[in-house]
Image (spheres, helix red, strand yellow):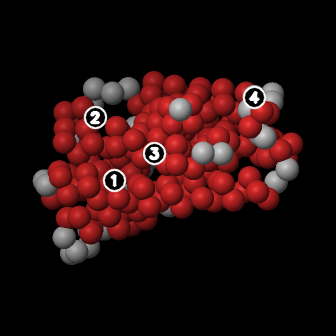
Amino acid sequence: MEAFLVSTGIVALAEIGDKTQLLAFVLAARFRRPLPIVAAIFVATIANHAFAAAIGTWITSLMGPELLRWVLGASFLAMAAWTLVPDKLDDDDTQIAGYGVFLTTLIAFFLAEMGDKTQVATVALAARYHSMIAVVAGTTLGMMLANVPAVYFGDRIANRISLKLVHGIAALIFAALGVATLLGAGASLGV
């Protein structure tokens, strides 16, 4: 349960103001059809995060527990720093293909999420918790918690959220995970 809850919280916080959330705003404004956009975000997130979690699980098989502890601790600290860097949407991310709402959103969201903070966090969380299903379920729920309101309420909520505060909280959580991992928390899990 811890893997699920931590994954949900970290990704929900890290996603606020992230380029994929900005993409959700753009798609919602462009198509004005929230249900297929939300469905496509859900499918793209599951596919993307399942892939990321599989990599995280695979990485744990390549490293011994001591090396893995240092790599994960450093990764979480790097994620803390990265979370403090504001995201912006690239022109490539906003190119809207003519494949319909669902397929356009699915492709755009999947590609925008490649190498994104939340995908990298999913790799690290899967390696840390050794529970691929709980991590994917948690990170997917976190993505949906951040993006569904963006699709449905857009500008009405965007201006009411302090991105600096949210990013600061997410950075603190990543940093705490990093320090805890470096200090040996999770040793009973082989990390």
How far apart are labels 1 and 2 at the CA level?
21 Å
Up-down relation of residue 19 to residue 84 (above or below): below
Report which residue position mark 1 lands on. 42
**Mark closer to the chain start, 1 or 4:** 1
For mark 4, give the secondary structure. loop
Residue 132, visible in the rendered structure: yes
Side of 53 relative to 165 (left or right)? right
The answer to which of 148 and 92 lies nearer the viewer is 148
Residue occupying image coordinates x 28% and y 34% = 158
Up-down relation of residue 186 to residue 43 (above or below): above
Q: What's under tag 2, amino acid-wise?
A: Ala
**Mark closer to the chain start, 2 or 4:** 2
Report which residue position mark 3 lands on. 137
Residue 125 x %, y %: 61, 43
**Mark closer to the chain start, 3 or 2:** 3
Q: What's under tag 3, amino acid-wise?
A: Ala
How far apart are labels 4 and 3 at the CA level?
23 Å
For mark 1, give the secondary structure. helix
Report which residue position mark 4 lands on. 185
Residue occupying image coordinates x 32% and y 64% = 106
The answer to which of 128 and 133 lies nearer the viewer is 133
Report which residue position mark 2 lands on. 158
For mark 2, give the secondary structure. helix
